[in-house]
Image (cartoon, grey):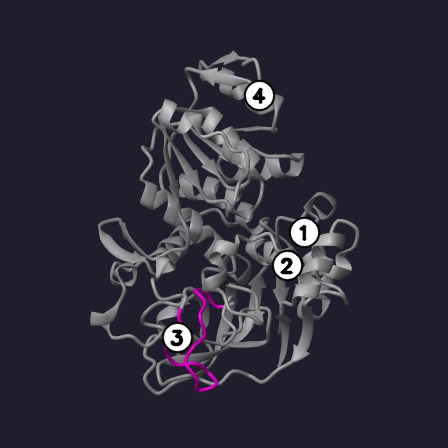
Amino acid sequence: MKALLFSVSIPRIILNKALQRYTDSVVFGSFSGLSLRDVAVPRLPGPDWVQLDVLICGICGTDTASLVYKTSPALEPFVSLPAVFGHEILARVRAVGPDVTNVKIGDRVVIDPTISCRVRGRSANDYCPSCADGLPATCAHGGEASGPSPNGTPLARGLLLGANSDLPGGFSEHIVAHESQLFPVDDLIDDTLAVLTEPLSIAVHAVLQSAPEPQRDALVIGSGPIAFSTIWALRALGHRGTIIAQTKRPAEALLARELGATETVTPGDGARAALLRTGAAAYKPIIGAEVFSGGGFPLVFDCVGRRQSLDQALRFVAPRGKIILLGCAGALSKLDLSFLWAREVQISGFVGYGREHWRGRQCHTFEVTHQLLKEADPIPLRKLVSHSFPLSRYKEALSAAMHRKVSGAIKVVLTPK
């Protein structure tokens, strides 16, 4: 099968760091660690595993960040390389193990890419606390090699499909997954909506777990898929307060409003004016950027995760407000945390998906998202998938995803089949 394999070496890292601003060839071209190869179709590791044909796979910001070595080294022990990236996967069941009961050959499914204790073959009484609570995105065993793999050896370390050298992700034609990771897709949900399940579920999980008061005003910082997913999730889950979306370009502002934003602002003067309308007063310290007192937003969703966005969130949040961090922040230099304690602010970070309490029952985040998709207007959501490329044109796909200002991309997807 064809698969897009990413490998790492010290010379490539040095070359990438030195030249990535000047040429894409060191990121995904001939001088990079990325190559489209013929590899063996992965075998079923056990009787409760499933083999799948990948239909569509989204390109995530963590995929592109990994290609330019901007992910935090603190998470390196929970990844194994070389690996086939891609964890936003829509697939069709190709073959099933003899013990599989929840899917059949021909089913369309989306995949929870988390490698849980169950996926690693542990018995229920030996699950880590996170997996026992149904929240395997924080599984305690992601840094160890254990459990069944397609090659018959212990499964390599790594918390996700696509970040595990033994389990290829969706940038390939075929993959394998444990049956517990699979969620059948209703016929009412088309392929374009279905492939959005994973990023939408990140936002749904964050909104459900942070339980924001439904009438509070919110600021959503960011103009990528997670920011748009957050706006949609807030409205789909019944948020009634004003939602201010901070976007950079007119097309993004229009889409934010279609997904439920009350108002859109641009970074800088536009965002500052929105903050002052909340009753905030501006002050200029002797040294440093402008600060504000009074007013502010009770809820701030940082869907970027950079020093500038988190600094803005700390300055714009109301006293005793909540900052919900969904951007993949790593080591942030020169970040002033004064307002964290001076305003008694809560910061909560969320990752992944898992067991939710929703509408009086327990269910997986993907199931919540699918129900909300069936109840929602599909037209604005389909616009999130802005670009689609076959796997053979992966360089164009990655270029569009990494150079959004030029391409106008929001969510770029690959179609291996």
132 sits left or right of 58 in the view: left
Foreground mark, 2 or 3, reads 2
Q: CA distance from mark 4 to mark 1?
A: 29 Å
Q: Which residue is mark 1?
A: 402
Looking at the figure, which quarter contains the C terminus?
A: bottom right
Asked whether residue 61 is in view, the answer is yes
Q: Earlier in the sequence, mark 4 or mark 2?
A: 2
Q: Residue furthest left?
A: 125
Secondary structure of residue under mark 4: loop
Secondary structure of residue under mark 2: helix
| Residue at 39% in and 75% down | 178
Q: CA distance from mark 3 to mark 1?
A: 31 Å
Secondary structure of residue under mark 3: strand
Q: Residue 173, image x and y in percent?
A: 59, 76
Are the residues at dot 2 and dot 3 in contact (C-beta closer than 8 Å)? no
Secondary structure of residue under mark 1: helix
Q: Which residue is mark 2?
A: 67
Foreground mark, 4 or 1, reads 4
How dense is the environment of label 3, judged by Cα within 10 Å: few (below 14), some, or many (20 and up)? many
Q: Which residue is mark 3?
A: 178
Are the residues at dot 2 and dot 1 in contact (C-beta closer than 8 Å)? yes
Q: Which residue is mark 4?
A: 289
Q: CA distance from mark 4 to mark 2?
A: 33 Å
How dense is the environment of label 1, judged by Cα within 10 Å: few (below 14), some, or many (20 and up)? some
